[in-house]
């Protein structure tokens, strides 16, 4: 199974079925009323065999109503837990309902659901597949302290996982059965835990991690989460998240079935 280009419309990815996989698309959402409905509809169109669940992370706008109207199952958290807390709820939902694969798709519309089958196909050779933004596809870019932090984190986590990475902070990821079992109980809820710390936990637990180049789409709604000051804060918090991840005891998942 792979992404193909339409002969009539070069560059357009065709809808593909995901064979022999029970896939849950998890969309964490906080005040994304302007974009979440379009994302849900895009997911249903691109991967009609998958189940789509929106984890509402304490939104104060019409996110829940928009997601529900678009046809998603919505789990509403009682208050804001952050992306990590929302994804942990998603992994627990997946385990409780027998899903083999969890794919995280952001609610702002930047992740192209048509690439979900490509990520899932990568699970044939890995437990976690990252949709990498800085791997030669697309024109997504960052500058300044945020760029330095991302490069450093990719190098460090790559050394831990014994794998070369260019992007370890992407939220566009697929997790296979062993990773679903691991993350249902051990997914970190702290700031940046959903990216940095989760990958460190997975790598130290023996999970196979790989990345696949992907292109990002323009943000469909809301405001970007970074700026000059926030980028500097990101650098400090990223370092703290990495240190916290290394201080956690290694999780033994040798008995988790693949």
Image (cartoon, rainbow, N blue to C red):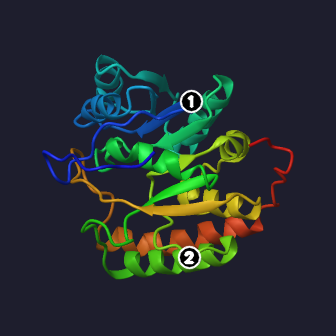
The residues bearing labels 1 and 2 have C-alpha atoms spaced at a distance of 29 Å
From the viewer's perspective, is 258 left or right of 130? right
Mark 1 lies on residue: 22
Image quadrant in which you'd find residue 225? bottom left
Say which residue appears at 60% left-offset and 50% top-offset.
124
Q: Which numbered tag is attached to residue 10?
A: none
Q: Residues within 10 Å of mark 2 (few under 14, many from 20)?
A: some
Q: Measured along the vertical axis of the image, is residue 77 above or below residue 115?
A: above
Residue 56 or residue 47, whichever sits in front:
47
Q: Quadrant of residue 203?
A: bottom right
Name the image quarter holding the C terminus: top right
| Residue 164's disc number | 2
Name the side, left or right, on which 150 lies relative to 182.
left
Q: Could you tell whether 165 is left or right of 93 in the image?
A: left
On the image, the x and y values in percent for residue 114 come to 33, 43
Whole-percent x, y for residue 37 in the image: 27, 29
Residue nearest the viewer, comparing 29 with 122: 122
Label 1 secondary element = loop
* Residue found at the far front of this picture: 7
Would you say residue 132 is visible in this rendering? yes
């Amino acid at each position: 199974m792979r992404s193909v280009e339409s002969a009539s419309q070069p560059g357009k990815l065709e809808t593909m079925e995901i064979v022999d996989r029970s896939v849950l698309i998890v969309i964490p959402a906080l005040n994304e009323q302007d974009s979440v409905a379009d994302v849900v509809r895009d997911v249903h169109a691109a991967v009609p065999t998958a189940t789509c669940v929106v984890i509402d992370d304490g939104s104060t706008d019409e996110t829940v109503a928009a997601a529900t109207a678009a046809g998603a199952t919505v789990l509403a958290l009682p208050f804001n837990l952050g992306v990590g807390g929302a994804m942990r709820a998603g992994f627990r939902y997946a385990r409780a309902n027998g899903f083999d694969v969890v794919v995280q798709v952001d609610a702002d519309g930047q992740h192209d659901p048509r690439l979900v089958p490509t990520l899932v196909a990568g699970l044939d050779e890995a437990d976690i597949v990252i949709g990498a933004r800085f791997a030669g596809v697309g024109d997504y870019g960052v500058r300044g302290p945020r760029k330095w932090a991302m490069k450093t984190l990719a190098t460090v986590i790559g050394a831990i996982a014994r794998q070369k990475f260019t992007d370890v902070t992407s939220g566009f990821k697929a997790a296979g059965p062993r990773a679903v079992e691991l993350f249902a109980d051990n997914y970190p809820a702290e700031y940046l835990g959903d990216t940095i710390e989760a990958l460190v936990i997975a790598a130290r637990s023996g999970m196979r991690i790989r990345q696949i180049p992907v292109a990002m789409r323009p943000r469909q709604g809301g405001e970007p989460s970074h700026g000059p000051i926030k980028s500097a804060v990101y650098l400090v918090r990223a370092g703290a998240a990495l240190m916290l991840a290394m201080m956690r005891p290694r999780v033994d998942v040798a008995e988790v079935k693949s």
